[in-house]
Image (cartoon, rainbow, N blue to C red):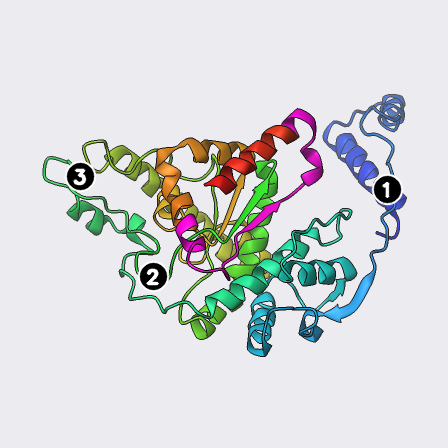
């Protein structure tokens, strides 16, 4: 922003103009007195605070010009995979900051790393780039998936299928939820756990991952270069449908919870389609990334993630603490443990955002929680 003071003045003047227009009087003296009052600090707004940001050192490199020295452990073909995946939506061919290149190199060289930088410095890309390098390499070895159930991406809207699962006396005979990834042959496990201190930051991260892993370009890459396999990500917090078990303690489908999930997915599906229409109408393509597309790489529900843990799991510490105590979430950790035990080349990535917030008593609690996680 070249003129922050001018921008502040413009915004303030526009608000005052709105007030004068919407609540105008026919008395000039009252109008003048009100405007003078509104312009006083701490009445309608505070005087702006200007925070100068440092100019972060550039690396002189873009994604396309990274070499094997910047990507230790990756061969020539794996480097090509990494660059093509990242270019699908995570990072355009901008010049990288020096700390982003250093983080990429250090992490791939099997170091535990911390990156500290200010707002707008690309910290998120700093930890996502090495993660994508690892996932692009591992995914090249995945076995091709089988043929999915034709209803897997539409069962929540398929009333004929749902009715076939319900008896004449309105009792559900079998669950009509079709697991999102039941057709896959590769091992499902959490390759990366990203932990945020608050849900608002989780939502921001989801938008980025949708651009990176569920854009049209990413979908083409998965289809053409990964035999139809996808790198899955999922948000697991209080907003994720549906809490509780899919089946009762007697082994019968829980009709109320299944109906609740169905209603939730219908709403999500409708919102995604509305966003696509808006993007087509206005040309604002980013609108589609504010909502999950249910036929892509984003996992839909808790039950789907319990069946097949996502490659990238996003949550907060409160939910992680609850998950570690619940029997219903045990499969997520057990499948990840089994996957890790399958080879020394397998790496579990633990990513903690806003690390500076965890100090004192709260920091100690978080540290013990992470110990419990790693012991699992």
| Rendered residue at 52%/62% (across/down) | 135
Q: Who is closer to the viewer here, 59 or 291?
A: 59
| Rendered residue at 62%/58% (across/down) | 110
| Rendered residue at 40%/57% (across/down) | 295
Horizontally, residue 177 falls left or right of residue 337, namely: left
Q: Nearer the viewer, mark 1 or mark 2?
A: 2
The secondary element bearing badge 3 is classed as: loop
Nearer-N-terminus badge (1/2): 1
Label drawn at residue 184: 2
Label drawn at residue 51: 1
Query: Which residue is tagged 3?
Result: 172
Q: Residues within 10 Å of mark 2 (few under 14, many from 20)?
A: some
The secondary element bearing badge 1 is classed as: loop
Q: Are marks 3 and 2 in contact (CB under 8 Å)?
A: no
Q: Which residues are magenta?
A: 337-362
Quadrant location of the C terminus? top left
């Amino acid at each position: 922003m070249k003129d922050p003071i001018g921008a502040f003045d413009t915004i303030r003047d526009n608000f005052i103009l709105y007030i004068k227009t919407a609540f105008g009087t026919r008395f000039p003296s009252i109008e003048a007195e009100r405007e003078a009052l509104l312009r006083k600090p701490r009445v309608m707004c505070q005087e702006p605070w200007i925070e100068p940001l440092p100019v972060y050192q550039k690396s002189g490199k873009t994604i396309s010009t990274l070499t094997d020295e910047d990507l230790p452990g990756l061969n020539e073909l794996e480097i090509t995979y990494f660059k093509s995946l990242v270019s699908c939506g995570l990072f355009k061919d901008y010049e990288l900051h020096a700390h982003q290149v250093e983080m990429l190199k250090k992490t791939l060289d099997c170091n535990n790393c911390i990156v500290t930088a200010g707002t707008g410095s690309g910290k998120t890309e700093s930890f996502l780039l090495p993660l994508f390098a690892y996932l692009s390499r591992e995914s090249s070895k995945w076995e091709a998936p089988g043929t999915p159930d034709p209803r897997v991406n539409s069962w929540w809207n398929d009333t004929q299928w749902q009715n076939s699962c319900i008896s004449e006396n309105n009792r559900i005979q079998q669950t009509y939820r079709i697991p999102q990834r039941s057709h896959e042959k590769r091992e499902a496990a959490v390759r990366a756990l990203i932990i945020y201190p608050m849900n608002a930051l989780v939502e921001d991260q989801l938008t980025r991952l949708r651009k990176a892993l569920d854009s049209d370009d990413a979908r083409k890459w998965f289809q053409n270069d990964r035999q139809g396999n996808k790198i899955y990500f999922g948000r697991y917090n209080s907003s994720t449908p549906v809490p509780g078990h899919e089946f009762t303690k007697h082994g019968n489908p829980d009709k109320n919870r299944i109906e609740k999930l169905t209603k939730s997915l219908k709403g999500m599906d409708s919102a995604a389609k509305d966003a696509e229409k808006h993007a087509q109408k206005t040309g604002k393509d980013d609108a589609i990334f504010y909502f999950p597309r249910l036929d892509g790489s984003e996992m839909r529900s808790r039950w789907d993630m319990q069946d097949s843990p996502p490659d990238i799991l996003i949550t907060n510490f409160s939910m992680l603490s609850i998950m570690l105590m619940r029997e219903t979430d045990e499969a997520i950790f057990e499948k990840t443990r089994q996957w890790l035990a399958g080879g020394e080349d397998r790496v579990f990535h633990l990513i903690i955002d806003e690390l500076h917030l965890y100090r004192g008593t709260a920091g100690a609690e978080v540290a013990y929680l992470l110990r419990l996680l790693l012991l699992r």
